[in-house]
């Protein structure tokens, strides 16, 4: 599954997109986020998961926080790194992460019934950088 940042080119941009979503990989993403929310702690480096291939060095960390901030570009957090343009932190409350898990579930092995059609789902639109998952290859 690819992780890509699209800064422009569509009225829906900027956005982070996971594509193509296949049930096995989506199940693994679901489990990593589920563990973050309920078992192991407060953050996970999504880009470092073995089934994620980052496009153009895109990095995304997920974090449980007290207030929903959505996707935040690392540079806006005051990090001084000259070549960072695609490094993000996705900051949601525990309750909001549970909603993201509910939205991901239909794309997992447990719930995927028909893979003949391209499907997509907005996972988060809290900030001006949205997050999308799609079963199709990006064609724009």
Image (cartoon, grey):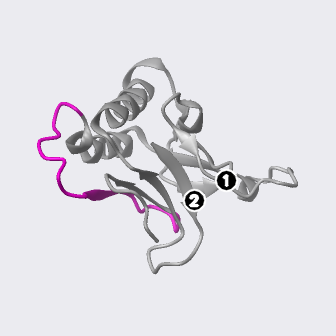
The foreground one among 50 and 72 is: 50
Quick check: is 123 in the magenta stretch?
Answer: yes
Disc 1 to disc 2, how far (Cα)?
8 Å
Rendered location of residue 36, percent (x, y): 45, 27
Q: Residue at x 40, y 30 (%)?
A: 37
Magenta region, residue range: 109-129
Note whether 14 is above or below 72 in the view shown: below
When asked about the image quadrant of residue 39, the answer is top left
Q: Secondary structure at mark 1?
A: loop
Q: Residue furthest left?
A: 113
Quick check: is 108 in the magenta stretch?
Answer: no
> Mark 2 and mark 1 in contact (Cβ < 8 Å)?
yes
Residue 41 placement, left or right of 23: right
The foreground one among 134 and 92 is: 134
How packed is label 2: few (under 14 Cα within 10 Å), some, or many (20 or more)? Answer: many
Q: Which mark is residue 56?
A: 1
Q: Main secondary structure of the magenta part?
A: loop
Q: Which mark is residue 5?
A: 2
Q: Residue at x 52, y 48 (%)?
A: 3
Rendered location of residue 75, percent (x, y): 75, 56
Q: Which mark is residue 99?
A: none
The foreground one among 131 and 22 is: 22
Mark earlier in primary sequence (1, 2) = 2
């Amino acid at each position: 599954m690819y992780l890509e940042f699209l800064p422009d080119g569509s009225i829906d941009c900027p956005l982070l997109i996971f594509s193509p979503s296949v049930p096995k990989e989506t199940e693994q993403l679901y489990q990593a986020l589920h563990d973050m929310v309920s078992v192991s702690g407060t953050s996970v480096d999504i880009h470092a998961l073995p089934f994620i291939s980052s496009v153009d060095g895109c990095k995304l960390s997920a974090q449980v926080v007290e207030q929903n901030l959505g996707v935040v570009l690392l540079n806006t957090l005051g990090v001084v790194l000259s070549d960072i343009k695609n490094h993000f932190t996705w900051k949601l409350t525990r309750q909001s992460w549970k909603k993201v898990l509910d939205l991901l579930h239909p794309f997992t092995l447990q719930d995927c019934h028909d893979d003949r059609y391209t499907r997509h789902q907005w996972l988060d639109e809290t900030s001006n950088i949205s997050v999308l998952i799609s079963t199709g290859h990006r064609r724009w």
